[in-house]
Amino acid sequence: MTTPAADPAPEVQQPPKHPASVPATPAATTPGPRRLPVAVWVALGIVYVVWGSTYLGIRVVVETLPPFLSAGTRFVVAGLLLAGLVAWRQGPAALKVTPRQLASAALVGLLLLVGGNGLVVLAETSIPSGLAALLVAVVPAWVVLLKAATGDRPSLGGTAGVLLGLTGLGVLTLPGLSGEVAMGGVLMVVVGALLWAVGSFSAGRIPMPASPFTASAYEMLAGGLAGLGIALLRGEQHGFDPAAVSGRSWAALAYLVVFGSLVAFTAYAWLIQTAPISLVSTYAYVNPVVAVALGALVLNEALTWSIVLGGAIVVLGVGLIVSTERRG
């Protein structure tokens, strides 16, 4: 799972104190038209394509690698690399956090990377990557509902977006109900998306590390170690032969570590402090389109009527939410 916009318009995977929730700087909220530098468009393109391609990468990884073993390895390696980069660029002191901040980051990491991403990885052993991406795209709708449950009334557009998103979700589950795909896989992604939303929603309301990079490093380490623990409990290590893993699965895993977890994340963290948040948030409905297109082109995944119609409804709903909801 990439890091889809969890909080409607302005926030991302992990609200306040995480890349997704780092408040927009004055430059990002200054009214009036202005010419955006080329670097903004390059970074936005990276987020669009790389995060959209992670679903394809996951599908290729689990062809010959165990799900939680590969996901846990991905985030442990990425977390160590990110922590090393933070210490190198800002000094070891940048990694210093309080026990409460560390516990909060670990909790968010478990919700996002074990509950959210982990279930998606497991589900992609039985369902198409494009379908998984569209099911995950409903995350902003879950966040709106969570905010509403805590007294934050959604806007009219946000309410319409939630209704559209849930309608699209219903259409997308039809392949599972009809037996065309594994219903268990569909349900795993739905639950994973809900846990991702809970993690994103919670991150803005608990004491997280001030630096989004430091927070993400600890989140990835916590989520990765927990994922490896689950892999051991599931017995994924039994009979596992690294020599039997295909070259493309290893390559896809390396791609997810370097590009999915580091390059795209860094681009996003920079964007939310540099570009208009309304522009940056568009990745929430572009990513699933990229994922579906890549799944069809690279893996020949079928584009059934339910995926096309349900996906279109979900993207429209997410677009409404992203364009109308305020930062919570």
Image (spheres, grey):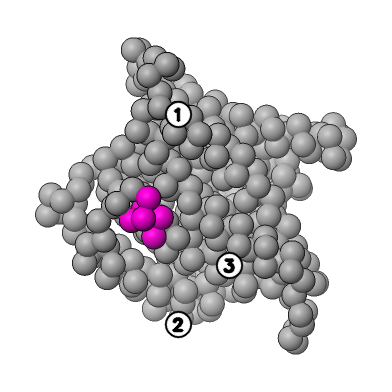
User: How many numbered marks are there?
Assistant: 3
Q: Main secondary structure of the magenta part?
A: helix
Tag shown at residue 156: 2
**Residue drawn at point x = 48 percent, y = 47 percent:** 54
Q: CA distance from mark 3 to mark 1?
A: 35 Å
Label whose residue precedes the other's in the sequence (1 or 2): 2
What kind of element bears circle 1? helix
Q: Which residues are magenta?
A: 293-298
Amino acid carrying mark 1 in the image: Gly
Q: Which residue is mark 3?
A: 281
Which residue is nearer to you in this view: 325 or 269? 269
Amino acid carrying mark 2 in the image: Leu
Label whose residue precedes the other's in the sequence (3 or 1): 1
Q: Which residue is mark 1?
A: 247
Q: Is residue 108 above or below residue 173?
A: above
Whether residue 108 is in magenta: the answer is no
Measured from the top left, where is residue 212 in percent x and y?
A: 71, 48
